[in-house]
Image (tube, helix red, strand yellow):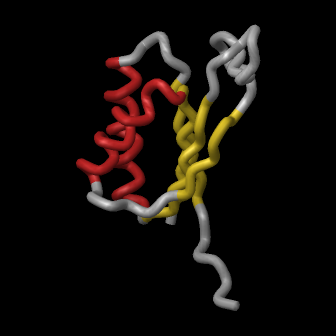
Amino acid sequence: MTRLEIIANNTVEEDIQEALNQVEEDFSYSRLNAVHGRGRTTPRMGDAVWPEENFIYIIYTDDEKAQKFVDTIRKIKEKFKQEGIKIYALPFENPLEL
């Protein structure tokens, strides 16, 4: 299993959503809204000085599909070179059944 974290500017969310749906239609994810911070580009603080905001998708999937998602995000990043788009893949063991 792999945990994917996709962090990107709100302006590219629709493009990312459509691209990920091409890998797996109706894939399962959690979305964190109004994510503030600073990476290598300008800050995203959602205020008057730095008005933009990011979002985070968290996806748990099998390793093969995870690689397809990563490849898809790479293609989106090539299209939107100036946008802060990151993806992190972390190995994950299945959660305990409670």
Question: In the image, is residue 21 above or below residue 6?
Answer: below
Instruction: Please report the residue visible at 44 percent of the width from the left and 34 percent of the height from the top.
Output: 13
Quarter of the image that includes the C terminus: bottom right
Image quarter for residue 97? bottom right
Which of 69/46 is in front? 46
Residue at image coords 41%, 41%: 70
Q: Quadrant of residue 79?
A: top left
Left or right, 30 with respect to 61, comes to right
* Figure check: 48 above or below 46: above
State the image coordinates of residue 40 (x, y, percent, origin top left).
66, 14
Left-right relation of 59 to 66:
right
Is 77 on the left or on the right of 86, as rendered? left
Compared across the picture, whether 80 is left or right of 91 comes to left
Q: What's the residue at 74%, 26% (across, down)?
A: 37
Q: Residue at x 50, y 66 (%)?
A: 1
x%, y% of residue 30?
Answer: 56, 57
The residue furthest bottom is: 98
Q: Quadrant of residue 25?
A: bottom left
Q: Give the number of callouts.
A: 0
Residue 91: x %, y % from top left: 58, 58
- The residue nearer to you, when weighing 88 against 36, is 36
Residue extending farthest front: 48
Taking depth in this image into account, of 25 and 67 the one nearest to the observer is 25
Say which of 63 and 31 sits in front.
31
